[in-house]
Image (cartoon, rainbow, N blue to C red):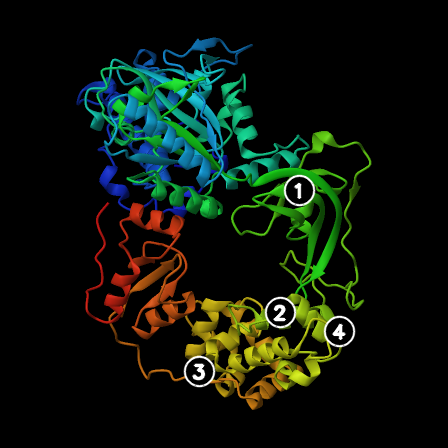
Amino acid sequence: MSNGEGTGKKGADAGRSAGKGAAKDAGRATAPRRGAAGAKGGPGARAEELRALIRDASHRYYVMDDPTVDDAVYDGWVRELESIEAEYPDLVTSDSPTQRVGAQPSERFASHRHVQAMLSLANARGDEELHDWNRRLEAVLEQEGMGGQPVHYVVEPKIDGLAVSLTYEEGHLVVGATRGDGEVGEDVTSNIRTIKAVPLVMRPEVGTPPARVEVRGEVYLPLEAFAQFNEARAAEGQPTFANPRNAAAGSLRQLDPRLTAERPLSAWFYAVGASDGLAATSQHAVLEWLRAAGFPVNPLIAVYEHIDDVAAACEGWEKRRGEIDYDIDGAVVKVDSLEMQRRLGAVARAPRWAIAYKFAPTTATTLLRDIRVNVGRTGAIVPWAELAPVHVGGVTVERATLHNQDDLARKDLRIGDTVIVQRAGDVIPQVVSALTQRRSGDERPFEMPVDCPACGTALVRPDGEVIWRCPNRSCPAQLVESVIHFASRGCMDIEGLGEKTVQKLFDVGLIANVADLYDITADQLIPLEGFKDQSAANLIGGIEASKQRPWPRIINALGIRHVGEVTADAIALVAPGLDALLDASADDLARADGVGPVVAEAVTEFLSADDNRAMLDRLRVAGLTMEMDVPDGPIVGPLTGCTVVVTGALQGFTRDEAKRAIIAAGGKSTDSVSRKTTFVVVGADPGSKAEKAEKAGVPVVDEMTFAAVLAGGQPVPARTVV
């Protein structure tokens, strides 16, 4: 739905449904069209029917992430409902989807006292403090006569947003309030109503709703939306926000709800406060009730039976936090049994039955000391930030990527700015935005150099590209980067040949391109600083072992623009050896799966250069594996016609080995889950792909099942209907 529930806002939501396959099954949810004053039940009945359709479609889109109608159908319902309500004002209800933004701006927020206090959480930093907490709660349970009873735990991602409490009466939203001091918050009902993920009315699947219930959750700003929001503010000359939490809090506390509606807020819900008529015996049962009532409940929440499993889950989420599109600053661990929660009680305004396992922060502010540029292996001139050292995401960061000149200009970054730095998981640190409100006037704009800083050649910017490039194929910086890429793990995987070693070999004149690697001897290495007999022998051994890498890996290692691992595999199938590759035309290469004219042209341009052809001939003479066997026709095997995604760490396969096993079995290996995916193989720490597959009804299998399918001993898992 491009404009939410009739608010008229396109902005951040525009076009999203197209990318999610929103048009699928569009017809199944389309109601028979009747005029506003049509017969069957008249305008009142039609208005109620439209409200139900719009609520259901919004729930499927904003909460379930599974659209069932396209924008045209949805917008038609909204326009028809608006038309009926305009003609018959007495039919307008406060919970109508057209009334999400209906309040006038406030001069100030009224206070709201929570019926049940919103307690804060004690923190655990690391496994030891988590186990200490568990020992304390077990001691209290022993005193309460519940010692020896099994304790189950619910682990929930700790969303870094703004805590809210929503009060519903007979299933209808009546109050939305911030946490405040835990006892009294601010009444922000008009703003809460603008958030599409928040149900104005509970869904009928919940049955008879409680007479009154407080629902607790967290309002947040997705990371991608936050970046776009900050960039838009910078472009308009407005101050940017330091992090998504600040942006969410500022958005929810706008006195004019129309401003809140313009901001792409969302929410997760995870608890119930005071209630009148809700019966549940466990935390996970509460979550199931919330989900049935129409509230977005995080699908990553899980129940564990042992505190060691809880610790492992928390550690896993700290590693994988960069794979999701919202900030989490920890995990919340709760005792599942509500009776145990009651017995454990609270101390110092914090419940004994829950604790926050805190992660290292992924964002920080620091000084942008300077902006410099690197020359990449394809001649790309990439700016980077020199930062005042700052601790973020568990490491000290002093450098961060700035992508390109257009990105710099869009973010309006200047040397001397105080900037927001983000590092999530193993992602390269990046500068999110500048805190323009802190500028003193001494900051300096960055100017892109006109000549290559490595070789002095005049830079060029090809038509249609945002990257400036050095066109000199002999540029020393490009040569060094090409060798680093060639030796990297996804390519030739030469043990011991890292960036510093490559630079050293280049500086002393032992290498000028990748073919020179295979002429190096141990005697040449031993005199160099950092080398001894054993380390020299190890490097020579690593170079020698790389000769056995398969032909597709060599294509990837060449560093041709637009060619990565998957594309290299596809090219190898239509050019299964060096001679075939050298003879291939752009049209020949374009026959490869996923290779279009731009990629094909980049490959033929690379191969047309005399120095590149000479380098390839030297690699063949050195003994590299420059060909492979290709079957005459399509590969027929257990995975014929299947598309398989592998995520997480497998025990019996490297990632490359798993992909090649899929191809050898007749299947296709891809890196992203889509409607075409047959099944997903998960290893350790699988991340968000497994979650996306389960939501889409795509089968998820473990490594053992994967191996059995490859061997033909088990059928391909069938999709489920969702």
Residue with the mark numbered 1 = 390
Category of crowding for the residue at label 1, using alpha-carbon neighbours closer than 10 angstroms: few (below 14), some (14–19), many (at least 20): some
Q: CA distance from mark 1 to mark 3?
A: 48 Å
Q: What label sits on residue 484 in the rendered view?
A: 2
Category of crowding for the residue at label 4, using alpha-carbon neighbours closer than 10 angstroms: few (below 14), some (14–19), many (at least 20): few
Q: Mark 3 or mark 2: which comes first in sequence?
A: 2
Q: CA distance from mark 1 to mark 2?
A: 28 Å
Spot occupied by residue 609 in the image (x, y as percentages of width and height): 64, 81
Q: Mark 4 or mark 1: which comes first in sequence?
A: 1
| In the displayed structure image, the side of residue 716 where residue 620 appears, left or right | right
Element type where label 2 sits in the image = helix
Q: CA distance from mark 4 to mark 3?
A: 35 Å
State the residue in front, 502 or 462. 502
Q: What label sits on residue 507 in the rendered view?
A: 4
Q: CA distance from mark 4 to mark 2?
A: 14 Å
Please tell me whether mark 1 or mark 3 is closer to you in this view.
Answer: 1
Asked if one can make out residue 677 in the rendered structure from this viewpoint, the answer is no
Element type where label 4 sits in the image = helix
User: Please, what is the three-letter code of the amino acid marked with disc 2?
Assistant: Ile
Q: Quadrant of the N terminus?
A: top left
Please tell me whether mark 3 or mark 2 is closer to you in this view.
Answer: 2
Element type where label 1 sits in the image = strand
User: Please, what is the three-letter code of the amino acid marked with disc 3?
Assistant: Pro
Please say if 602 is above or below 210: below
Element type where label 3 sits in the image = loop
Quarter of the image where one finds residue 365: top right
Q: Mark 1 or mark 3: which comes first in sequence?
A: 1
